[in-house]
Image (cartoon, rainbow, N blue to C red):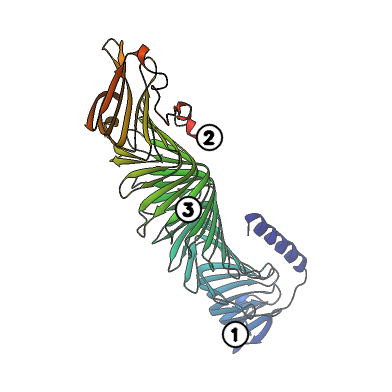
Amino acid sequence: MTLKSLFFTLICSLLFANGLLAQKTVIHIERARLADYNSKFGKDVQRLIGDVIMRQDSTLFYCDSAYLNEKTRNFEAFSKVHINVNDSLDIYSDRLLYNGDTRIAELFDNVRLVDDSTLLETEYLIYNRFTKLATYPNNGKITRGDKVLTSIKGYYQTDIKEFYFRKDVVLITPEYQTYSDTLVYNTNQEMAWFHGPTVIRSDENTLYGGYGWYNLRTDEAYFTKNPAIYTMKQMVYADTMFYNRNTGFGRAGGRVQIVDTNYQLIVKGTFGQFWELEGKSFVTDSALAISYDSKDSLFMHADTLFLYFDQEREAKKMEAYFNVRFFRNDLQGTCDSLTYAMSDSTIRMYRDPVLWSEQNQLTGDSIHIMMTNKALDSLVMYNTAFIVSRDTIKGFNQIKGKNMIGYFEQNELDNIAVEGNAETVYYVREEDQSLIGINLAKASRMLIMLVESQMERIIYQSSPAEVMYPEKELPEGLDILKGFRWLHERRPADKHDIYRKNL
C-alpha cells in the first residue's frame, strides 16, 4: 500500500466516524460486585468494583474497578483492563480512559493489542472504535510468529490488518534484519512497503533501497531509488531491482553496475540478471567492463557480459559475447567473443581477433593474453598467426607463422617466437632511416627481437632461407605475405570508441 492510499483510507474512516458521532449509545453495566454513588466523585459518577464488565454496542470492557459517568458516557478503568473489540481483536492494559461519545480509548501501562496471531506491545495506545485505528506515539513492539518489529511511532488499521510505522523501524526475523524510516505492513498479505532509506541485512548479503516492497511469505523484494545488494566481495547497483532471497535470483534495470573489489572489476549495463545459487550474472545493453588499478584501466564493451562466481562468491570467470572491443593505453583489441579466467589471469579472444600493441597489429584464429598483476606477461596466437606494423616511411613489416608466442617487458612486446612455416617481410634501414633493402625470409622457426615495439633482429632457428632485395629490384607482390590484412580502421581510438561497431 502506498502512503497516498493509506491516507485516503484514514480520511474515509474519519468521515465515516463523523457521521456516526451523532448516534450516541448507552454504556451498559453488565456486571460488578459493588456499585455505588459517592458525592466526592461527582453526582453522575458511579464507582464499580470487582469483576467489572461494561458494554457499549457490541464491545465489552473488563476491569477490576472503574469510575463511570453515565451522563457523559465516559469512564476510567483500573487493573486487568481488557477490551474485547470483536472475535479476533482484544486490547489489554493496566488503566483505561474511555470516551463513549467519540469511542476513543486511551490505554496506559503494559498495553497489549492482540489480533489473531499479531501482538502489539507498548506503554500508551489510543484506539478509535469508529475508525478502527490504533495509535502508539512512543515506542511499540509487534510480534507475529517468528517476526518482531519495533518503531518509535505506529498506527494499526485493525479492519484491514495494516500497520504503518515511523522512525527507527526495525524488523527482525530468523533469516534477516530490516531497518527503515517508514514501513507499511499488511499482516493478511504479509507484505511490507518501504517509504524511505531501507536496509535488509542477512548472513549472505545486504539489500538497500529508498523505496519498495518485501513479500515476507515468498521472500521477494523490489526496490527503487538507488537500490543495491552488497556481499563481502561484490556490490550490485541499479535504478530498479527485484530479488528473491529463497532462489537467489535477481533482476536489475537502469544504471546497472556490478563491482568486484577483490579483482578490481566493474561491469555495467542497463539491464542485468543474477543467479546466486548458480554463481552466474549477466549485463546487457551498453554493457561495459572496467578492469581498474592505480596505473591503468582496461575498458571493454560487448553486447552481453557474463560474470561467474564460485560458492564463496569469488569471481572466477568473465565472458563477453559479440562485437567485443576493448581499450587500454598500451593494448587495444576487437573480436567476436572473449573470456577472462581469474584463476590464470588469461584473456582468450575468439573468432577474428585483432590485437594492437603500440605499432603492432596481431591476428590469428584465436589469441590468448596472459597477465601478471594486471601487467602484460605473454601472448599466444594460434593458427595463421600474423603480426603487421607500418614501416617508418612506406610499406609494412610482416611476420607470419602457424603459431606465435610473444613476451612483454613493461607492457611492450620484447620478443616473439614463431613456430611453424615462419615468414617475414622486413624493411632494413640505416640509422638515418635510408632504406638498405627489403628482407624476405622463411624458416621453420624464428625468434624475433624487438626494440620499442619495432623489429630489431631476427634469429632463424631451423631451415632458414633469406633474400635481401633493393627496393627497385623487389619482384611485384613479394612485399605482401599471403593473408595480409591491415585493419587499422577497427582499432579503438580511446575508451569511448569501444562502443563503435566493428567494420
Q: Which is more foreground, mark 2 or mark 1?
A: 2
| The quadrant where residue 290 appears | top left
Q: Between disc 3 and disc 2, whose residue precedes? A: 3
**Occupied quadrant, residue 350:** top left
Q: Which residue is mark 2?
A: 501
Q: Secondary structure at mark 2?
A: loop
Q: Is residue 68 left or right of residue 229?
A: right
- In the foreground, 106 or 152: 152
319 or 451: nearer the eye?
451
Compared with residue 253, is residue 151 higher up or lower down, i.e. above or below?
A: below
Distance from label 3 to label 1 (Cα)?
51 Å
The type of residue carrying mark 3 is Tyr
Side of 236 where 466 appears, left or right: left
Q: CA distance from mark 3 to mark 2?
A: 36 Å
Q: Are marks 3 and 2 in contact (CB under 8 Å)?
A: no
Q: CA distance from mark 2 to mark 1?
A: 85 Å
Please name the residue shown 37% across and 51% down the image: 315
The number of numbered badges drawn on the structure is: 3
Give the secondary structure at mark 3: strand
**Dot 3 alpha-carbon crowd within 10 angstroms: few under 14, some 14 to 19, many 20 or more:** many
Q: Could you say where residue 487 lies in the image, as x and y percent from the top left?
A: 45, 28
Q: Nearer the viewer, residue 312 or 47?
A: 312
State the residue lying farthest toward the bottom: 33
- Can residue 264 be seen here? The reply is no
x and y, in percent, of residue 429 in the image = 29, 14
Q: Which residue is mark 1?
A: 52
Kindly identify which residue carries mark 3: 208
